[in-house]
C-alpha cells in the first residue's frame, strides 16, 4: 500500500476562532458535558481519523491582573476526558496532554498505562513542558522554570515513565504513543529522542518541508528511524461549496471576535501591551522583538508573523489573520480545493498528515468528514477502514517489542 496521510482532530472549546463561543450554534453547557466530546469522537471514527487530541491549559487568561472571561477556553482534564469517551469508540486514538513540569512521573505513567490497557492500546500522551509562566502560581511555585531546566526534567521524566512501563503489564501496543509539539531548538532536540508524532506549526509549504527535513535528520542523528515519526502541522479549514461562500463564511467568523479580545490574545502571545498602537499602522515589529516572550525565546516572530503581499501587515490585518487560528495555517475554499492543498503538502514532503483545528465546532469539522475525506479516499491518500485495533497500527508505526 502506498503512503497515506495521518489525520487528527484538535477540538478547543467551541472552535479555535477566539470568538467561536458567540457562534449561533454554540451552547455554553456543551463544553462541560460528556455528550459534546463523545459526538466529536464518533465523528472522528466515522471519518477513520487516527486520533482526537485534547490540550491542557493550566492557567487562566488575565488582563491587568483580572480574569478575562472572553478569552477563556474551558478545558476539562484531558486524561479524564479521554477515559470518559473511550467507551463510545472502538478504533480512534485518544491523545491527552500532560505536563512534565507540574505533575509526577510515576502518577502520570500509571494513568496512561491504565488508559492504554483499558482501551486496547489506543492511548497517546502529548508531552509538554508548559510554556506559560502564569502556571507556576497555580502550583504554589514562585517562578516558572527556565526552558532548559524544563526540558532536562522532561527527558528524565519520560525515561522514568518508560522504565516503569517496561516493568508493568502492557497493552496491545506495549505503551502509549508519545506525542510532542516542541518547535524551539530545545523542543526539537527533545522530540528527536522521544516523539512518535509531532504536532507542528508551519504556515507555508516551504516552511513545512524545511522543518520536516530538519527534524528527520535530527531524529536519524539520535539513532532512530525518521519514518517512525509522523509530522502533523495544524490547519484550520473554512469550507463551503464555492470560494465566494467560503470567503463570506470567513468574514462571518471574523466578526465573532471583538478587537479588544484580539488585542488581549496578542498581548498574551508576545507578553506586551498593544492597546497604544493604531490598528491601521504596520505591526510594531521593533517593539515586538523586545517583548518579554520574544526575548526569552518563548515566541518566534519570524514564524508567527506572515507578510501580506510582501509587506509587514498592519496591526488590524494581523489581528484578523491571527484571530482565525492564532499561529497555525488556515485554509478558505471548497472541499476539492482543500483536498488539493492537503495533497500538495503531503506529496511534496511538507508533512505526514494534518492536525485539523476547526475554527467553529462542530460545523466545520462535519464538513471535513462529509465532503473532504471522501475525496482523499478516492485519490488513495487516506484509508476507508482502520488497519488494526491500536493507535500504533492506525499510524502505521512498527510494533514495539517492549515498552
Image: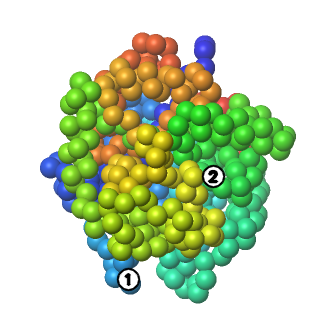
| Residue 292 in sight from this viewpoint | yes
Quadrant housing residue 237: top left
* Residue 221 vs residue 225, the one in the foreground: 221
Q: Position of residue 166 (x, y in %)?
A: 75, 51
Image quarter hosting the N terminus: top right
Q: Is residue 40 toward the left or the right of residue 312 in the image?
A: left
- Which numbered disc flags the more N-terminal residue, 1 or 2? 1
Q: From this view, report whether residue 294 is shown above or below residue 323.
A: below
The residue at the point 27 percent across, 27 percent down is: 243
Residue 134 placement (x, y as % from top left): 50, 76
Q: Is residue 388 above or below residue 40?
A: above
Q: Which residue is mark 2?
A: 183
Cα gap from disc 1 to disc 2, whole angstroms? 29 Å
Whether residue 204 is situated above or below residue 63 in the rendered picture: above
The residue at the point 37 percent across, 23 percent down is 337
Q: Secondary structure at mark 1?
A: loop
Residue 26's spot in the image, x, y percent? Answer: 20, 52
Say which residue appears at 34% left-offset and 82% top-offset: 66
The type of colouring in the image is: rainbow
Find residue 114 and name its label: none
Residue at point 49%, 14% (across, down): 380
Q: Is residue 160 left or right of residue 254?
A: right
Q: Say whether marks 1 and 2 touch (CB < 8 Å).
A: no
Q: Secondary structure under badge 2?
A: loop
Disc 1 crowd, CA 10 A, few/some/many (<14, 14-19, 20+) = few
Residue 38 x, y percent position in the rendering = 33, 45
Please give the residue where the numbered disc 1 appears in the rendered image. Answer: 64
In depth, the one of 363 and 89 nearer the eye is: 363
The answer to whether 396 is drawn above or below residue 62 in the figure is above
Q: Quick one: which residue is furthest to the left in this view?
A: 24
Observer-nearest residue: 35 or 145?
A: 145
Amino acid at each position: 500500500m502506498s503512503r497515506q496521510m495521518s489525520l487528527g482532530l484538535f477540538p478547543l472549546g467551541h472552535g479555535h476562532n477566539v470568538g467561536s463561543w458567540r457562534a449561533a450554534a454554540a451552547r455554553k453547557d456543551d463544553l462541560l458535558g460528556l455528550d459534546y466530546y463523545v459526538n466529536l469522537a464518533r465523528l472522528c471514527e466515522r471519518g477513520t481519523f487516527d486520533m482526537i487530541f485534547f490540550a491542557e491549559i493550566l492557567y487562566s487568561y488575565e488582563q491587568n491582573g483580572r480574569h478575562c472571561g472572553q478569552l477563556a477556553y474551558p478545558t476539562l482534564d484531558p486524561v479524564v476526558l479521554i477515559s470518559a469517551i473511550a467507551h463510545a469508540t472502538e478504533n480512534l486514538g485518544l491523545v491527552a496532554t500532560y505536563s512534565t513540569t507540574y505533575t509526577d512521573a510515576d502518577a502520570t505513567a500509571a494513568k496512561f498505562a491504565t488508559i492504554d490497557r483499558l482501551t486496547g492500546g489506543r492511548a497517546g500522551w502529548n508531552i509538554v513542558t508548559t510554556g506559560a509562566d502564569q502556571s507556576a502560581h497555580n502550583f504554589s511555585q514562585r517562578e516558572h522554570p527556565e526552558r532548559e531546566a524544563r526540558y532536562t526534567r522532561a527527558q528524565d521524566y519520560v525515561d522514568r515513565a518508560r522504565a516503569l512501563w517496561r516493568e508493568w503489564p502492557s497493552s496491545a501496543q506495549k505503551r502509549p504513543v508519545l506525542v510532542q509539539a516542541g518547535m524551539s531548538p530545545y523542543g526539537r532536540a527533545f522530540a528527536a529522542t522521544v516523539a512518535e508524532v509531532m504536532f507542528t506549526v508551519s504556515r507555508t509549504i516551504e516552511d513545512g518541508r524545511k522543518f520536516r527535513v530538519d527534524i528527520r535528520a535530527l531524529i536519524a542523528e539520535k539513532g532512530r528511524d525518521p519514518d517512525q515519526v509522523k509530522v502533523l502541522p495544524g490547519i484550520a479549514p473554512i469550507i463551503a461549496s464555492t470560494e465566494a461562500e467560503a470567503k463570506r463564511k470567513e468574514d462571518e467568523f471574523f466578526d465573532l471576535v471583538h478587537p479588544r479580545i484580539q488585542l488581549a490574545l496578542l498581548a498574551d502571545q508576545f507578553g506586551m501591551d498593544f492597546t497604544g498602537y493604531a490598528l491601521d499602522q504596520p505591526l510594531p515589529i521593533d517593539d515586538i522583538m523586545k517583548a518579554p516572550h520574544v526575548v526569552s525565546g518563548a515566541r518566534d516572530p519570524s514564524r508567527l508573523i506572515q507578510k501580506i503581499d510582501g509587506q509587514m501587515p498592519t496591526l488590524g490585518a494581523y489581528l484578523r489573520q491571527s484571530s482565525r487560528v492564532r499561529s497555525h495555517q488556515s485554509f478558505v475554499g471548497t472541499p476539492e480545493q482543500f483536498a488539493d492543498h492537503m495533497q500538495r503538502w503531503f506529496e511534496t514532503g511538507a508533512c505526514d498528515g494534518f492536525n485539523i483545528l476547526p475554527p467553529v465546532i462542530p460545523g466545520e469539522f462535519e464538513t471535513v468528514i462529509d465532503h473532504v475525506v471522501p475525496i482523499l479516499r478516492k485519490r488513495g491518500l487516506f484509508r476507508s477502514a482502520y488497519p488494526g485495533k491500536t493507535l500504533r497500527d492506525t499510524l502505521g508505526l512498527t510494533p514495539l517489542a517492549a515498552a
